[in-house]
Image (cartoon, coloured by chain):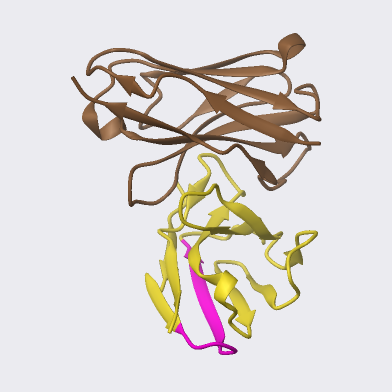
């Protein structure tokens, strides 16, 4: 059964670093890419970045200087780290997968999301 | 970056009514487009991919069409469970970009 589950702190202080984990089951990170998407309360979806099955990464240019995505394939975990958090980073953070393929494949499974509030 | 302009921002439909939601891309995305439904408090669910392919388990009243820069999602016969927010997502280039969303409510 395919599953993705985000975990991490619900509250982060301004200027601090956010660390989130996406733990996957039912598929291998050697065959799938994992994306991070966030959604501020009451607003739309924003793509943040991807880690490909190869371990390569690509980031949203608006976040590139603050964002890092990595993974531990043996533990089926993908990690997001974002520094210098501000209140506008308050959002629900999702991880989602797509199949590694030369060309486009859709995000077919998403995690349940984790709400992160940036506040002192 | 490819801009995805989605319309309308909100929509109210009666039971059984057919509704359409549009997405226009700022450049040709070669049918590399998906539609998602997001219900309140839940994660997005894939409805349509490659512009017109129906995801397994999605009711056949949902359909997608389009090419080039213009795409649409049609719901043929609104049901109560179809309430939610709908998003398009282009997969042609990075960064991936979403439409702004369409909130669909039952009238």
Q: Residue furthest left?
A: A120
In which quadrant will I find the C terminus of chain B?
A: bottom left
Q: In this view, does A52 lie to the left or right of A94?
A: right
- Picture colour for chain B: yellow
User: Can you tell which quarter of the image residue A52 is in?
Assistant: top right
Residue at 61 percent across and 67 percent down: it is B68
Position in image of residue A40 (x %, y %): 34, 42
Task: Assign the magenta stretch its main secondary structure.
Answer: strand
The question of residue A24 being in magenta is answered with no
- Picture colour for chain A: brown
User: Can you tell which quarter of the image residue A76 is in?
Assistant: top right
Report how many numbered discs are placed on residues in the image.
0
Position in image of residue B84 (x %, y %): 49, 65
The question of residue B19 being in magenta is answered with yes
In the rendered image, is residue A41 in sight? yes
**Relative to residue A86, is residue A108 depicted above or below?**
below
Position in image of residue A55 (x %, y %): 67, 17
**Relative to residue A44, is residue B22 depicted above or below?**
below
**Relative to residue B20, is residue A20 depicted above or below?**
above
**Relative to residue A3, is residue A76 depicted above or below?**
above
Q: Is residue A6 left or right of residue B58?
A: left
Residue at 22 percent across and 18 percent down: it is A14
In the foreground, B35 or A22: A22
For the record, the magenta segment spans B13-25
């Amino acid at each position: 059964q395919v599953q993705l589950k985000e975990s991490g702190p619900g509250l982060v202080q301004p200027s601090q670093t956010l660390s989130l984990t996406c733990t996957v089951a039912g598929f291998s990170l050697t065959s799938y890419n994992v994306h991070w998407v966030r959604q501020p309360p009451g607003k739309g979806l924003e793509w943040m970045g991807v880690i490909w099955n190869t371990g390569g990464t690509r980031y949203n240019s608006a976040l590139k200087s603050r964002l890092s995505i990595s993974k531990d394939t043996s533990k089926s975990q993908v990690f997001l780290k974002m520094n210098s958090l501000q209140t506008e980073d308050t959002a629900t953070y999702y991880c989602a997968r797509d199949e590694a393929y030369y060309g486009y494949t859709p995000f077919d499974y998403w995690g349940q999301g984790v709400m992160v509030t940036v506040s002192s | 970056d490819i801009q995805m302009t989605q319309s309308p921002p909100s929509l109210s439909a009666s039971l059984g009514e057919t509704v359409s939601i549009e997405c226009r891309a700022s450049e040709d995305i070669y049918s590399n487009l998906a539609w998602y439904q997001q219900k309140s408090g839940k994660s997005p669910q894939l409805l349509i991919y490659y512009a017109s392919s129906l995801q397994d388990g999605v009711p056949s009243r949902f359909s997608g069409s389009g090419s080039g820069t213009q795409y649409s999602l049609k719901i043929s016969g609104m049901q109560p469970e179809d309430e939610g927010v709908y998003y398009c997502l282009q997969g042609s280039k990075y960064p991936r970009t979403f439409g702004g969303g369409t909130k669909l409510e039952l009238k």
